[in-house]
Image: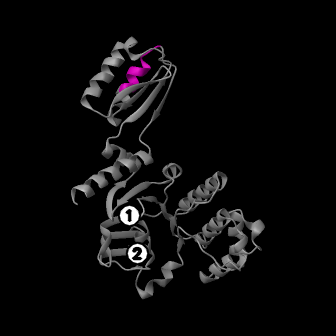
Amino acid sequence: MNEPLISLKNIVKRYRGVVALDDVSMTLNQGEILGLFGHNGAGKTTMMKLILGIISPCQGQINVLSNQPDKSDAWPIRAQIGYLPENVSFYEQLSGLEVLTYFSKLKGYDKSMAINLLEQVGISHAMNRKVKTYSKGMRQRLGLAQAFIGKPKLLLLDEPTVGLDPIATAEFYQTVEQLKTQGCSIILCSHVLRGVEQHIDRAMILSAGKVQAVGSLSALRQQANLPVTIKPVGLRQQLNNHPELAQYVQCHRDNNSKNKVTNENGEATLLVPEDKKIEVLKHLLANNDLHDLSLQSASLDQLYQHYSAIANQSNQEHK
């Protein structure tokens, strides 16, 4: 098995007695996208700074691209890392091309790399304009171009779609998928959970410096035991006209408080446990009145709210 590109083991980081990260462990493999989520102050930026080698841990071990990132001899690995901070800032009096050419040369690439990346992020038409004339969205695109220099092996992206319109956001995620197929590993922080969900392989949820949950979305759904929403179309009558289905759902509602039935425009909406969805679907499909249905497992947003609520409750109990 290949060694992970990133390995954090029992990391503790304190700032003047305040614990920013508390016994955090994680790995990131080649070609994997990890979504890193948490409230402001949860420790996301601290984790990124540790991976970049900008700061050092108080306890624990960090390995990035087979090196300790905070060591003086780790500078060669930084050319293989792309980073987009949450708040991008560039030299206002330089043009977009001048800015990107400067950063490209820092990584050992020439002006042609800068031009190609400006075209890729859709601002080549403004490459000769000063950055101070750029809109917020254009600055964000310039920041993305800077992060993509040299086709990095590792990308750290903090709120990368802030200021981007829907088309630019879609194009950004297309680029992320292309980089992933080329073996690039990515850590992606975002508060826009709905857009991130389909692009990540695993999610890590931080709360007050602790790992609250980590794993694939399917694993987190199974662990959280949140209900699946099933909306049948065609059952215009109330469920009491379908006694077998009504009895089945009522039975589960008694055993699981998360399971209930509502009515919306005469249609039933069922919330059932993840491990019971096939059984419920069989009951629905056996009904002749049914002509369509939709099924939705717990979203990333719902999972985040679930694990955050657990963290908040735990924090209250320890106060």
Within 10 Å of the Cα at label 1, are there few (<14), some (14-19), or many (20+) other Cα atoms?
some
Within 10 Å of the Cα at label 2, are there few (<14), some (14-19), or many (20+) other Cα atoms?
many
- Who's the residue at 46% across and 33% down the image? 295
Question: Tag 2, which secondary structure?
Answer: helix
Q: Which residue is mark 2?
A: 50
- Kind of residue sitting beneath label 2: Leu
| Tag of residue 63 | none
Residue 190 falls inside the magenta stretch: no
The CA distance from mark 1 to mark 2 is 14 Å
- Is the stretch drawn in magenta largely helix, strand or loop? helix
- Kind of residue sitting beneath label 1: Ala
Determine the residue located farthest toward the top in the rendered image: 241
Q: Which residues are magenta?
A: 280-288
Q: Which residue is mark 1?
A: 42
Q: Is residue 65 visible?
A: no
Residue 192, above or below 53 = above
Query: Whole-percent x and y of residue 8?
Result: 34, 70
Residue 249, above or below 59 = above
